[in-house]
Amino acid sequence: GRRLPLDWDPVLYSVLVAEAAWHSLRYARPKATASQSTSAFRDIHVAAPGPLLLDALMAFGMPCAQLHECLASFLIRRALAWLDLKVTVDATSLLSVASGTRPLVLCPTHRSLLDFVILGQACFELQPLIPVLQVPRVA
């Protein structure tokens, strides 16, 4: 028969299932046309105003992340929610990055200090989907 891997973590699995269920309920949209449904799968919400529990699950449920990174992510998510800021990333534009054959340099064009915070948060949240992305080091 089938067996679970030796390193299977039921808590992490439960968090991931709860997170997936929450996102399916939160971002449920009415029936859409083919072009609208394609864009629904293309857009990834990196930060959006939401409840405290969702922010905690998103931050501390990140696989292979260190505790201080999770805590920073949680605080950033709460700050962005307080600012009522919504960040959406077009996933199709990141497909070329997934190959990882070339180095990636992200250069925000706006001259505010918040750009680097949002960029770091986006890399942290998208890292499970695109493993080449790392939390950026800002000089």
Image (cartoon, grey):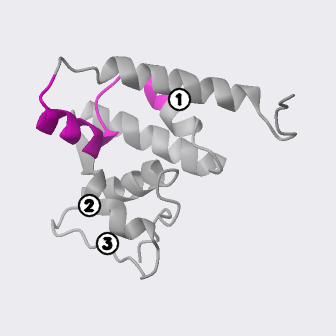
- For the C terminus, the quadrant is bottom left
Q: Is residue 48 rendered magenta in the image?
A: yes
Would you name the residue on which mark 2 appears? 93
Question: In terms of secondary structure, where does tag 3 sit?
Answer: loop
Q: Residues within 10 Å of mark 3 (few under 14, many from 20)?
A: few
| Residue 134 sits above or below residue 34 on the image | below
Residue type of the residue flagged with mark 3: Leu
Question: In terms of secondary structure, where does tag 2 sit?
Answer: helix
Would you name the residue on which mark 1 appears? 57
| Residue 100 sits above or below residue 65 on the image | below
* Image quadrant where residue 24 sits: top left
Would you name the residue on which mark 3 appears? 106
Residue 127, can we see it? yes
Residue type of the residue flagged with mark 2: Ser
Marks 1/2: CA–CA distance: 26 Å
Q: Is label 3 in contact with label 1 (beta carbons under 8 Å)? A: no
Which residue is at a point 62% across and 50% down the rendered structure image? Answer: 65
